Image (cartoon, grey):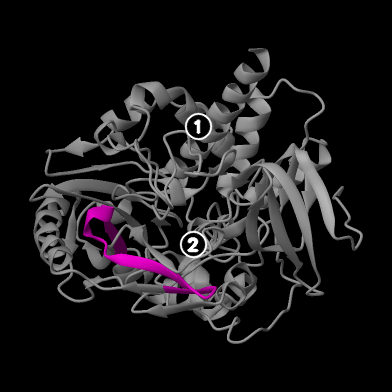
Amino acid sequence: MCSVKISESSVLDLSSHYVILGSGLNAISTVHGVLDNCKVDNKKIFVIDASMDKDSNLDKGNGGVRPKMPSPKFRIESNLYVYKNFKSMLNLTEDSFHTIGSLAKGGLSNIWGGSIQPYNEKELSDYPYSYMEIKDTYSKIYKILTDLEIDFGEFEKGFEGSGSFSTGKPLLAINVKNGSKNSCCLESCDNGCIYCNKNIFNSGNELDYFISSNKIEYMPGLFIASISFEQGYYLIKCVEVLSGKSFYIKAGTVYSCLGAISTAKVVLGMSNKDSHVPLLTTPGGAFFVYSVRRFHKLDHKILSSRSFKGEADNQRFDGNIFPFSENLLCTYFGESLGKLANKLLGPMLFSRLFIANIYFTSDLSLSTLSNTNNQIKIKSEVVSSLKLSFKKAMGIIKKGLHSEGLWMLPFGKKILRPGQDVHYGGLIPMKRDPAENQCDFNGELHGFSNFYIADSASMPFMASKGHSFNSMVNAYYIASKSIKRETKQIIS
């Protein structure tokens, strides 16, 4: 695999090229956006990435402590590297918030659920584009994630029910060409396997394709410590993850795809003063349901069996229903015990038992990120309006699920702790009239020419859905528009 090797020098000049920070879903989308629109042969794409992998072992502070997250994927030993050392490397502390981030090659796509939930026209009202303007990009990103074509209009029609509650078949980023290449040791391994995430799109695999086809220059093992603006260029301070050595990269055009929290830290550091910004999340909850009629007889394997959406007092909510599959049992208890439990209790219990999640819009989130002396702190609380919306939504969902042959169980209903939704954004939001620590409708950071926020940090609003697909759409839009503007300037 080809990658750029750095000799120990004070400054590496990449000012004549495009520099992309990070390797997750947004970085992949940004690379596609640049490649699809760039007509200049002598400009290269450099991707700078911390690229932690399973062999990385920094063991700084409490970097190896497992977070208290609802998804079982975070509790698997082999997945520890994905989020290991994130908080210690960023010098991040929390107050009533559970932060998840990644320094791994491919970022959190290594363990994400693969949910594809496009925003509709109303949900895009704060964005610089409408659904009709961006629908071709929706198809583009869906093709990248699944290697398939889709009619999103027909997908929306697939939801059945009233306006207050409806259900439909979920869209999932299953891609046999660009998912996990091999299944794990579990006999129950299938698409979306909880243990190995089989065939769920992984940014790291797409990155390998870009590298092998010489479409990018890859610079792994580099942590972005800070960025400063000097004499018309950006000076990016990089720290080698393993050795701790530092050097600088000189860049003219930068796309920050580090992830919302990492991007925010870099941007707040560029202002050279203590500051704080709002952190948008999609507050959520979880509950159990039991099948009494036909639902348990459907083909439930591993991933989401059914999606639902609705509205409670003008507050939108979306969610998914997941089976207690043999794969889940074997992941938790081991192959032998999991299979035995499923054999003994499966027909009357596990095949009929499901867990559901539910998310609300960022209007119900109350979190902030502050930067003081290079110390990042996230503070949050559960607002009373979220508690009320959750209670009302439970009543609507309980009634709606009866048509699917499901009973909502009286126990196990809970609101997730802030941060456990793992949908973060809006720290450096796109605004029509941007101020400090915001970006314009082109994704360009206010006051910093050719510095683009191409991850979820620039999303001005987060709908009650998984944000990965829409963040990729936003990144592709920003990258495409920036290259088109550049080309127009060159021609004129």
Q: Is residue 441 above or below residue 464?
A: above
- Expressed as whole percent of the image width and height from the top left, the position of residue 467 reads 41, 49
Quadrant in the picture for residue 270 = bottom right
Q: Main secondary structure of the magenta part?
A: strand
Q: Which residues are magenta?
A: 352-377
| Residue 51 in sight here | no
Q: CA distance from mark 1 to mark 2?
A: 21 Å
Per the rendering, the mark at residue 428 is: none
Q: Is residue 101 left or right of residue 245?
A: left
- Expressed as whole percent of the image width and height from the top left, the position of residue 486 reads 62, 25
For the residue pair 296 and 422, the one nearer the viewer reads as 422
Per the rendering, the mark at residue 477 is: 1
Which residue is found at the position 12% from the left and 38% from the top? 162
Residue 365 is a magenta residue: yes
Write down the residue under mark 2: 261
Numbered disc 1: secondary structure: helix
Q: Determine whether label 1 and label 2 are within 8 Å by CB.
A: no
Which residue is found at the position 23% from the left and 75% from the top? 412
Q: Amino acid at mark 1?
A: Tyr
Question: Of callouts 1 and 2, which one flags the residue occurring earlier in the amino acid sequence?
Answer: 2
